[in-house]
Image: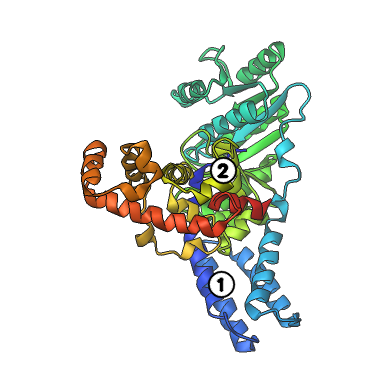
């Protein structure tokens, strides 16, 4: 499935940086004293509290980590840093144990007959947008026919919003009902229409409220009884902190919730909801919304999240992005011969790869240790910078691209006029090209930096 590049730089950066600082304090140590353990756990507790993680979860994590640290025996040449990381990884994965979905790629591919999905949640959490994201995913990634319907009769713009969003991605929206129809009547009509027209999935958008009340809860219970959903997804805003946990608790206490769809993961959330929700509710996080575009949806992979939290990057998601959105076409990939003769056309291909992957900053967010790179330095190399270099190369002759050493002062002036950049920009671009060429020659048989990472993973 596509994992949008916005996922490369979502709310875990601050948490990752702080945990990286904690690990740095024990780097190089040959043993951990009681004093070291006390300080480690103190810093870890503060980091999790600052990230708005539930105290219940924090207490559980600290107790488990302390217990293992006190029992562990250092074997072979394992460093305290390695041991601590291993323990933290295991305990983080344990709090996500309810979210470890088997065969999630087949989640919607094996349905027989009409399957229904119910979306529930408070107003303003991104419920309708999330519904369309999932509908789009099921239609185009699972090759299933999908119908969506809104049974929100309280908000005049509810149906219009769903119609606009679904029409953008050619998803059919059921609207054959009157303004006097109740939510239950609307659902019954939509189910009947879905079966008559052989739809694989019907996704129901229930009404949201600014707060939870008895009438809202009863309505959702009634809709659930009529539609008998195969999945009921509670949409939770990851930016609301512990309020999201409290509202989730009320929903889960009254309704059969299959799991969660976390939204706004590309925003300024501290990560507390992510680390607390599944553990406390004992239900899985199925999906996360990672941007404003309809395609910005990802399965929730606990191991990848833990890897990112601890600063190890997320190469698996990076490779999915490369394979799904860029691909490794044999005709366009750089081969061994073109590495030896690495010209400006090959350089331009690599620049395009970086732009399509979301830029250097978001690429680094997936690479181990990338979070520690100075952001002020990285910001200088944005997509405008790379686009400018591509424009310079496009203004060159075929011979100049193949033999950059030919580019003298007069040629630079001509290229400057053709590309609309300063002559100094052309000189900078040629310097960057020479540096990348040296890097590629060191790679040898690895097709490129990205190919090298692909081989490492696969």
Residue 229, x across and y down, in percent: 71, 30
Q: Is residue 8 visible?
A: yes
Q: Please, is residue 83 above or below residue 372 in the view?
A: below
The residue shown at (68%, 39%) is 255
Q: Nearer the viewer, mark 1 or mark 2?
A: 2
Per the image, label 1 sits on a secondary structure element best described as helix
The residue to which callout 2 is attached is 322
Q: Is residue 189 above or below residue 309?
A: above
Question: Where is residue 345 shown, x and y percent of the image?
Answer: 43, 41
Residue at screen point 55% across, 50% down: 448
Q: Residues within 10 Å of mark 2 (few under 14, many from 20)?
A: many
Crowding at mark 1 (Cα within 10 Å: few <14, some 14-19, many 20+): some
Query: Depth check: 165 or 178 in front?
Result: 165
Q: Quadrant of residue 35?
A: bottom right
Q: Is residue 280 visible?
A: no
Q: Secondary structure at mark 2?
A: helix
Q: Residue at x 38, y 58 (%)?
A: 378
Question: Image check: 101 left or right of 3?
Answer: right
Colour setup of the view? rainbow
Q: CA distance from mark 1 to mark 2?
A: 37 Å
Q: Quick one: quadrant of the N terminus?
A: top right
Q: For this rendering, which residue is in front, 168 or 425?
A: 425
230 relative position to 359: left or right = right
**Residue drawn at (36%, 61%) of the image:** 377
- Residue beneath disc 1: 45
- Across and down, in percent, residue 429 comes to 33, 51
Q: Nearer the viewer, residue 409 or 162?
A: 409
């Amino acid at each position: 499935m596509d994992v949008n590049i916005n996922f490369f730089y979502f709310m875990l950066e601050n948490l990752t940086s702080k945990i990286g600082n904690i690990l740095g304090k024990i780097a190089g140590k040959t043993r951990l004293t009681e004093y070291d353990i006390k300080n480690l756990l103190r810093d870890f507790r503060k980091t999790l509290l600052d990230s708005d993680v539930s105290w219940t979860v924090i207490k559980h994590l600290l107790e488990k980590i302390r217990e293992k640290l006190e029992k562990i025996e250092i074997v072979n040449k394992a460093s305290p840093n390695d041991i601590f990381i291993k323990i933290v990884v295991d305990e983080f994965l344990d709090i996500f144990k309810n979210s470890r979905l088997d065969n999630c790629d087949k989640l919607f591919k094996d349905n027989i007959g009409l399957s229904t999905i119910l979306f529930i949640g408070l107003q303003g959490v991104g419920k309708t947008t999330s519904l369309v994201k999932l509908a789009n995913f099921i239609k185009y990634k699972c090759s299933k026919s999908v119908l969506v319907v809104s049974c929100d009769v309280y908000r005049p713009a509810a149906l219009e919003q769903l119609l606009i969003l679904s029409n953008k991605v050619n998803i059919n929206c059921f609207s054959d009902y009157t303004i006097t129809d109740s939510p239950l009547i609307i659902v019954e009509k939509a189910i009947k229409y879905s079966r008559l027209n052989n739809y694989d999935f019907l996704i129901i958008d229930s009404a949201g409220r600014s707060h939870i009340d008895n009438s809202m809860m009863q309505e959702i219970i009634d809709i659930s009884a009529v539609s008998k959903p195969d999945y009921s997804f509670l949409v939770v805003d990851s930016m609301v902190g512990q309020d999201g946990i409290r509202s989730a608790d009320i929903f889960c206490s009254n309704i059969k919730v299959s799991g969660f769809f976390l939204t706004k993961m590309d925003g300024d959330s501290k990560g507390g909801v992510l680390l607390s929700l599944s553990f406390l509710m004992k239900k899985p996080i199925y999906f996360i919304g990672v941007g404003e575009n309809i395609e910005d949806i990802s399965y929730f992979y606990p191991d990848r999240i833990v890897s990112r939290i601890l600063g190890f990057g997320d190469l698996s998601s990076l490779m999915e992005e490369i394979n799904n959105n860029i691909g490794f076409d044999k005709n366009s990939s750089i081969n061994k011969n073109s590495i030896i003769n690495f010209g400006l056309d090959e350089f331009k291909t690599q620049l395009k790869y970086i732009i399509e992957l979301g830029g250097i900053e978001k690429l680094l967010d997936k690479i181990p240790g990338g979070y520690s790179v100075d952001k002020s330095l990285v910001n200088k190399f944005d997509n405008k910078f790379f686009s400018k270099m591509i424009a310079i190369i496009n203004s060159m002759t075929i011979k100049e691209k193949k033999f950059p050493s030919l580019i003298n002062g007069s040629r630079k002036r001509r290229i400057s006029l053709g590309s609309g950049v300063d002559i100094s920009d052309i000189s900078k671009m040629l310097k960057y090209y020479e540096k990348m060429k040296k890097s590629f020659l060191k790679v040898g048989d690895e097709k490129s930096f990205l190919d090298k990472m692909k081989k490492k993973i696969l």
